[in-house]
Amino acid sequence: MINHPDNGNYQRAIIIPLDGSRTAARAFGAAEAVARLLEASLHVVYVGKEPQPEEQLLRLLNLGQVNTKKIIFHQPTGQIVNAILELGTSLDASMIVMSSHGRTHDAGLVAGSVTMNVIQQCDIPVMVVRPLRQGTPDRDWQPGRMLIPHDGSPVTASEVDQVFSLAQMMGADIDVLHVAVSARQPVEAGAFTGPRYLDRPHYDWSGWADEFMRRFAARQPEANIRLVYRTGGTVAETLAFAREQHEDMIALIWRGQMAGERAATVKGILRQTEVPVLLKRIK
């Protein structure tokens, strides 16, 4: 769950890093929308050689006409990723929203180096927006549905409450997608695996679904949660389901390592997604 100090002075904070590129600025509408939905303050962080006057900074960041009264600008110096992470910690931010690519945009990469380093090191949920996709969220964006792939593992269960809470605060219904693990794949100790009869799920689907929801969603009695079961590859099934059901965003809980063949699901979805992806790293 997301626990906030119980005092009248507390306000949630949303951070968006910008580097002056148009690709990075494409995520600004999503950041504005999330700040509105969470009733949060919006913090823009730009790491440059020296602070710029506000009017010049707005031109530099390619923001166009914005209401600066609703934005707090931060212009730290130093290493970019460290500055973003330190600001997130100091503000106890609810979310960081950023474009998958920035100034050095390479469409062949899953994400730019700054984004990759932030999502691998950040304990705060990070929403990644693909800047070249159609329908990039604007300030009036209202996500109706959030898709959460859930592998039934204890580590995923340990972090899913925070994602559920964010979905509720944004007014989104939740689709939990469980993709069956092949018998050839290793299963994490304590994981809740799929129904026994994969070819005849009606035999034990009802009881399995009730137990799955009891284990992983019982602490969210007010959430509108739908459980869906599929077989196949996690990336392909997640993307297909998101398209079929017109999901507005996908949330992924992951271990935070991108090296080599790790995080294949995260990288596969980030590379192909048509909607924003909310990443929650397991501590």
Image (cartoon, grey):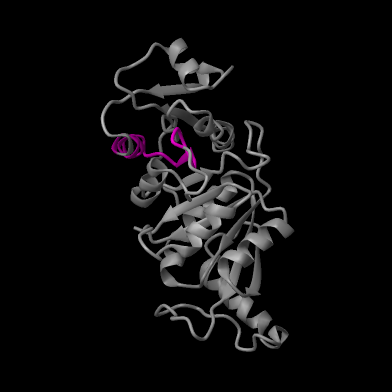
Q: Residue at x 27, y 34 (%)?
A: 79
Q: Quadrant of residue 244?
A: bottom right
- Left or right: residue 10 versus residue 133 is left
The range drawn in magenta is: 82-104
Instruction: Confirm whether residue 272 shows in the render.
Output: yes
Q: Nearer the viewer, residue 188 or 223?
A: 188
Left or right: 111 as drawn, with respect to 245: left
Q: Is residue 210 left or right of residue 216?
A: right
In the rendered image, which quarter contains the N terminus? bottom left
Residue, x 40% and y 64% (percent of image)? Answer: 262
86 falls in the magenta region = yes
Vertical position of residue 88 compared to residue 245: above or below:
above
Can you give x and y, in whole percent of width and height, for residue 125 in the image? Answer: 44, 48
Q: Is residue 241 left or right of residue 259?
A: right
User: What percent of the width, then of the height, locates residue 37?
Assistant: 59, 37
Q: Residue at x 53, y 28 (%)?
A: 22
Quadrant of the snapshot with the C terminus:
bottom left
Q: Nearer the viewer, residue 201 or 22?
A: 22
Q: Position of residue 157 (x, y in %)?
A: 46, 66
Please report the residue visible at 58 percent of the width from the left and 46 percent of the height from the top. Answer: 276
Magenta run includes residue 249: no
Residue 192's x, y, as percent?
A: 50, 78
Q: Nearer the viewer, residue 165 or 96?
A: 96
Q: Picture quarter containing residue 43?
A: top left
- Up the image or down, 95 lies above or below 247; here it is above
Q: Is residue 164 visible?
A: no
